[in-house]
Amino acid sequence: MTISVSLWYPSRDGMRRSVTSAASVPVRAPIPDVKTRKQQLVREIIWDAATSLFAEKGYEETTVDEIARAAGVSPRSCFRYFANKSEIMAYSLVSFAEQIIAALDACPKTWTMREVFRRMMLQVVEDAVKHPRARRVFEILKRWPAAAAAHSTRMADAQAMVSAAFEKRIPKNRTAGLAAALLGGLAIQMTGVTIRWCIEREQSDVEAAVNETLATFGQLFSA
């Protein structure tokens, strides 16, 4: 069985946040209107309630009605945001991609791809291993194959999103699309594997873990 290891974590106020580095120029994203922010907040509340129930009761044993009740919304409202339980589980993967994109977009345009990729991994892994939800999601994916299968249904979408963010940084040429696709897949998988590595081994030195991941990957092609 293949387990997707991509995880997502919110900021302390429950909303997704942009990631910036000290050396970067802040990227000003359009501010969502009130309706969009409200919808996003409700979506995050439902997702948070779902992961808690999945961890406590089991993925297959939890119903959408129970998730709606725990989130404080009606089942009808819940279905307005997520078509089914599988879609709720898959939500983390797209959100994880958005966190990667935020980290990429925060890097200065003058940085090399190596610098951008390393900074992205550092930021995303560091935030993930500090958040209890990351550990909770990892356990859900590990314990329930059906949850892992549902989670992976959005992998193609997530990779396409991240690849598009990379493509904006790649000079336009014949292989630009291929390079962006490779970087998108690598970003999701390498970052996810490093998060899992840190969680499983209680690794608190994120920078060391990221450096080891990148060094190990480099060694695979150095022989």
Image (tube, rainbow, N blue to C red):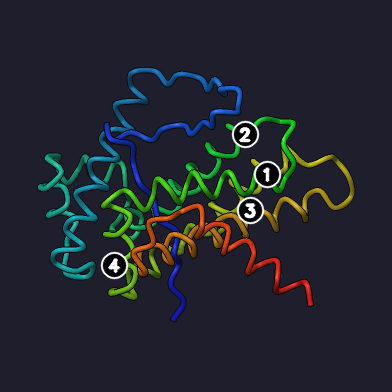
> Residue, x 34% and y 64% (percent of image)?
202
**Numbered mark located on residue 160 in the image:** none
* Tag 1 and tag 4, C-beta contact below 8 Å: no
Measured along the vertical axis of the image, is residue 140 above or below residue 92?
below
Asked whether the residues under the numbered discs 3 and 4 touch, taking CB atoms below 8 Å apart as contact, a structural biologist would say no
Q: Nearer the viewer, residue 97 or 215?
A: 215
Reading the chain from its start, which is encountered first: label 3 or label 1? 1
Mark pair 1, 4: CA separation: 31 Å
Give residue 107's mark: 2
Quadrant housing residue 85: bottom left
Q: Residue lying furthest bottom in this view?
A: 1
What mark, if any, has residue 184 been given in the picture?
3
Q: Earlier in the sequence, mark 3 or mark 4?
A: 4
Residue hosting label 4:
139
What's under tag 2, amino acid-wise?
A: Cys
In this picture, residue 182 sits left or right of residue 27: right
Q: Amino acid at mark 3?
A: Gly
Dot 3 lies on which element?
helix
Residue 183, x across and y down, in percent? 68, 54
Q: Amino acid at mark 4?
A: Glu
Of tags 3 and 1, the one toward the viewer is: 1
Q: Are marks 1 and 2 in contact (CB under 8 Å)?
A: yes
Q: Is 193 left, or right, of 55 in this rendering?
A: right
**How far is disc 3 from disc 2 in space, using C-alphas?**
16 Å
Q: Quadrant of the N terminus?
A: bottom left
On the image, numbered disc 1 is attached to which residue?
Answer: 115
Q: Quick one: label 4, few (<14), some, or many (20+) residues within 10 Å?
A: few
Badge 1 element: helix
